[in-house]
Image: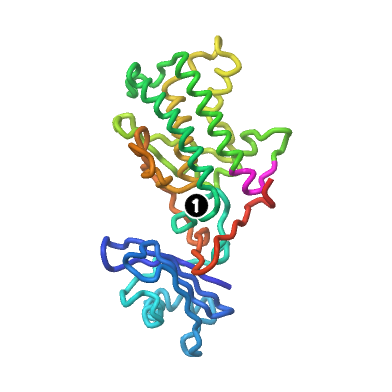
Amino acid sequence: MRFSGTLSSQMGPPRATNGTFSYDLERHVCSVTYDNPHLFAPSGWEHHVRAENERIRSRVEFDELRTSGGLAKRLWNWGALGGSYCAIEAWAEPKLGVGEHWPRIWQKGGPKPHEVGVQDVLTDAMVAYRGLESSILDVFNVVHPTKENMKAHGHRMRELLILCCTEVELLLVDAAKANGLKSGSRHYTMQDYVKLSEPLTLGEWGVKLQDYADYGEISPFEGWSQSNPNLAWYQAYNAVKHGRRTNFKQASLENLLLAAGAIFVLLAAEFGEGMEMMKFENPHRLFSVTQVPVRAPDDGYIKPTTGNWIPVPLFGPPV
């Protein structure tokens, strides 16, 4: 049985998360990794607890030590905190082992794209997104993004809505395949994709237009679940793709921004909140993240102190 949690420094920004720890009750091994290596060195550390009177042997003892502050003191004595006092913020019995992660499902403290072989995939996705972003910014020269103009529609917005939604489909199908999610029919559909909503916590992400704050927060996947698998902006995409004359008004600015925001959310949810965008000129030109999901402690990834990250597909072997 293993417990894991987060460490919060009493130095620097108040209650800033600085890392993760885990304790194995069978092997009596404590491992600590740091999100901010500049505060603690080295960035990863492991300790075998050999003293009988310091070993933790049960869930009850672990919880008592955590709540009393005794666990933080033991970590300090073992050298895990680099001489600095930290609080144990949260703990749980984790679903994954040390170094394990769900492919294409990002969490703070998890692997960087280059550490799990998807840097080229991210770069390709970012280049595609940048092209769509540039075209949408051109639309703003004609239709100002305000609440009053949400229902404005046109041929260029229809074209961009279709392109954005096909990019959404690509990101979802790649995440589905990486996690062994098989289609229930010949081709993947929203009935399949929606099974990724909870693991990716898509409904909890929020974004805003970087230069048009008055437009308000955009939550493309809000309320999306297996009991409610339809997304209005995605239905609009299908409607204007297959029936332009009768459904032309659905090629609206509102639906276009929801679809573009969905790409941005998926990039963040799959590859990381920052998406390594600082490598690109003029980062976050269209959107910025306003709301990041808060994961349950048992969902957390535990950084490996040595070795590589290990992919653990959610639904079975990769498709």
Residue 149 part of the magenta segment: no
Task: Answer with left or right where residue 115 lies relative to residue 187.
Answer: left
Is there any visible trace of residue 139 in the rendered image? yes
Residue range (magenta): 175-182
Task: Answer with left or right where residue 183 lies relative to residue 40.
Answer: right
Pointer 1: residues within 10 angstroms few (<14), some, or many (20+)?
few
Instruction: Give whichever of 138, 307 is nearer the camera.
Output: 307
Q: Residue at x 55, y 78 (%)?
A: 25
Residue 179 part of the magenta segment: yes
Task: Answer with left or right where residue 303 lies relative to residue 285.
Answer: right
Q: Residue at x 56, y 40 (%)?
A: 225
Q: Which residue is mark 1?
A: 114
Corner quadrant of residue 261: top left
Estimate the x, y position of residue 198 in percent, counting from the top left.
Answer: 55, 46
Q: Quadrant of the N terminus?
A: bottom right
In the image, residue 234 sits, relative to residue 304, either above or below, namely: above
Mark 1 belongs to which amino acid? His
Estimate the x, y position of residue 248 in percent, counting from the top left.
Answer: 51, 13
Q: Quadrant of the C terminus?
A: top right
Estimate the x, y position of residue 184 in percent, counting from the top left.
Answer: 71, 38
Q: Residue furthest top?
A: 245
Estimate the x, y position of residue 301 in percent, counting from the top left.
Answer: 51, 60
Is there any visible trace of residue 90 in the rendered image? no
Q: Residue at x 36, y 62 (%)?
A: 36
Q: Residue furthest bottom?
A: 52
Question: Total marks drawn?
Answer: 1
Q: How does the figure colour the protein chain or chains?
A: rainbow
SS at circle 1: helix
Q: Residue at x 66, y 45 (%)?
A: 181
In the image, residue 172 sits, relative to residue 110, either above or below, namely: above
